[in-house]
Amino acid sequence: MGKHGWKWLLSAPALFVLVLAASGPLTIVLVYSFLSPGTLGGVSWEFSTEAWFRVFFSRDIFDPEVVTWNTAHLTIFWRSIWLSLQTTFICAVLGFPTAWFVATRSPHNRAFWLFLITIPFWTNLLIRTFAIQELIRNSGTINSLLMWMGAIEEPIQMLYTDFAVLVGMAYVFLPLMVLPLYAAMDKLDFRLVEAGYDLYASRWRVLRHVILPLVKPGFIAGSILVFIPAIGAYVTPRILGGGRTMMMGNLIGLQFGQGQNWPLGAAMSMLLLIIVVGALMMYLRVVNQGGGERRG
Amino acid sequence: MSDRPEIEIAGLGKTFGQGANAFTALQDIDLTIDTGEFFTLLGPSGCGKTTLLRLIAGFEAPTKGSLRIGGEEVAGKGPNERPVNTVFQNYALFPHMTVAQNIGFGLKMLGKPRAEVDKTTKEMLALVRMEAMADRKPSEISGGQQQRVALARALAPRPRVLLLDEPLSALDLKLRKEMQGELKRLQTETGITFVFVTHDQEEALTMSDRIAVMSAGKILQLGSPSEIYHRPSVRFVADFIGETNFLDLPVTAVESGKATVALPGGTQAEASLPDGLTPAVGDTVTTVIRPEQAQVVAPAEADMTGTLESHVFFGTDTYLHLRLPGGEPFTLRRQNTVLADEPEPGTEMPIRLTPGALRILRE
């Protein structure tokens, strides 16, 4: 074996991961999305674009020629995007002051605050989600407390609403916003903030003209890190949204389970991937623009 | 330069932390800086000079005392409410803005109309000779250029006082010399009061109208560069600035403002006294004299004699390291105006001191 053969061998683990672990399953999903559903789940090896058609459209039960938009699916897609955007926004609004607080502590104390922020990461997602359920359900902590205080007569329906899913996702994904924001702020030269004050800018204007432009990469990275897992979220909408507030992840899960329509599930998975890749490309575009600005 | 006070500081103190961890960075500073003055705070790192600058800028709040700028008490006012701008040590230029945007930032924040911002920015670019770089980002210009932009940015709003925090320390020697001249020129042209912080004694001596030498949170001596150099009043100042010979000598007579001391070997010599110090006859005092204020002379003119131990040739000068009869080391700086042979170690050298150059320290 020649010199190059050795190099090839050394890259084998990386190739294995790339080909088998990443591209492999993706290829299978892509192939499945163009096959026909099997009778009891699985696929039958006949080429068909029906799954892709059914992602967006539905046929009339009595007359297959009558085609209408599949509003149930579209509503879920839209809800997924909208809830993920809202989650991203909430995480950004809550994450900025949090990250700022941590970044302005003494270096010794920062590790402690970062540790506190990452603790939820080490706790099982199910347990955390059930904990939120316990807080917001009709006979849960919040409603009981409000009723005991006499603020409300009837419990407020929070569980199994978009609101519940939003609270859950914002809670789960907040650290993913805080950490890149913190990283950006950690690199921020606080003398620039002082320079801003020194040059007659008020606190708000220093925030707007100096701090925000400089931590923008952190915001963008955080937004991507929150948006991508949020749009594919499964556990949180399943538990906190019940069956009423489904998101794409649940819809896909349904096709592989009760729905027994694997090709449809595969097509939806690919659609989810397309949305994520689209978001990533927007991210890269913004980042490159930032680089271009720097180059003048 | 007028004698109108620009900055009046009285009993100003700053303590960081509390209890056992408390650290007093500044204690009871009293200081008046005149309008249009080039004033330097000189001292080693940790002496409190930067803390004092930050108190004037408003980045830190004093623990006690009062601070007036242009006759107005500024305690409780933020940096954005003070007619003071700062040139930061590492310039702190906004990396996301162009050179022109950086320079115009202060005026924009002051709410000046756009036309005025543009006009002043152009003037400032011309003042620091950076017109060609207006649209570049700070990362695309050199350190010296960044320095000039930082100056222009701080001068653009025409502050009453410009604070400079070791602005030249990041530059190489040649550029630093150039910028020293540039700073002095800008100060003269604009007539703005400059408060300059440095640990570099040469920088302080060449540029300042007055220097405050600081150590351990206190001002040890305040005066013109030549006063500070020729008439140090405490050991720290004499030691920190330039090279010095320290000699402990007995006082033989005292008059107003000066005293007579006995040099090693017995010769009487006059020495000047710091204000308010009156030693008694018979006291031993610490005196200082600069190496260039002693000359090798004919034996008949000598004040004292030293034995040569070693010499170091510097081109324009030669340092002669001598030992006096009592065993004290003494360094003499001989200017090489004539082509003299280098002396042999062990040679006895008759020395004369420049009259009036000997100085008694307050210790």
Image (tube, rainbow, N blue to C red):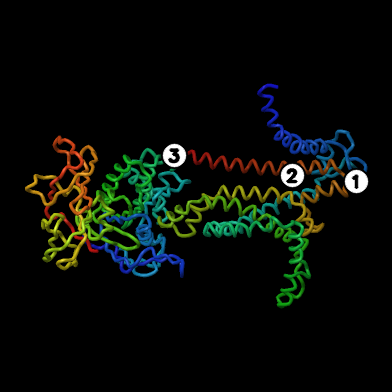
The label shown at residue B140 is 3
- Residue A146 at least partly seen: yes
Asked if A112 appears above or below A45 in the picture, the reply is below
Q: Badge 1, how many Cα within 10 Å: few under 14, some, many 20+?
A: few
Quick check: A227 left or right of B12? right
Q: Quadrant of the C terminus of chain B?
A: bottom left
Mark 3–mark 2 distance (CA, rounded to whole Å):
42 Å
Give the chain of mark 1.
A
Task: Pick whichever of labels 2 and 1 is earlier in the sequence.
Answer: 1
- Marks 2, 1: nearer the viewer: 2
Mark 2–mark 1 distance (CA, rounded to whole Å):
27 Å
The label shown at residue A232 is none
Q: Are marks 3 and 1 on the same chain?
A: no
Q: Badge 2, how many Cα within 10 Å: few under 14, some, many 20+?
A: many
Q: Tell me where residue A213 appears, x and y as whole percent.
A: 52, 50
The label shown at residue A272 is 2
Give the chain of mark 2.
A
Q: Nearer the viewer, residue A1 or B271?
A: B271
Q: Are marks 2 and 1 on the same chain?
A: yes
Q: Tell me where residue A293 appears, x and y as whole percent.
A: 50, 41
Location of mark 1 (residue): A61
Q: Tell me where residue B57 appears, x and y as whole percent.
A: 37, 59
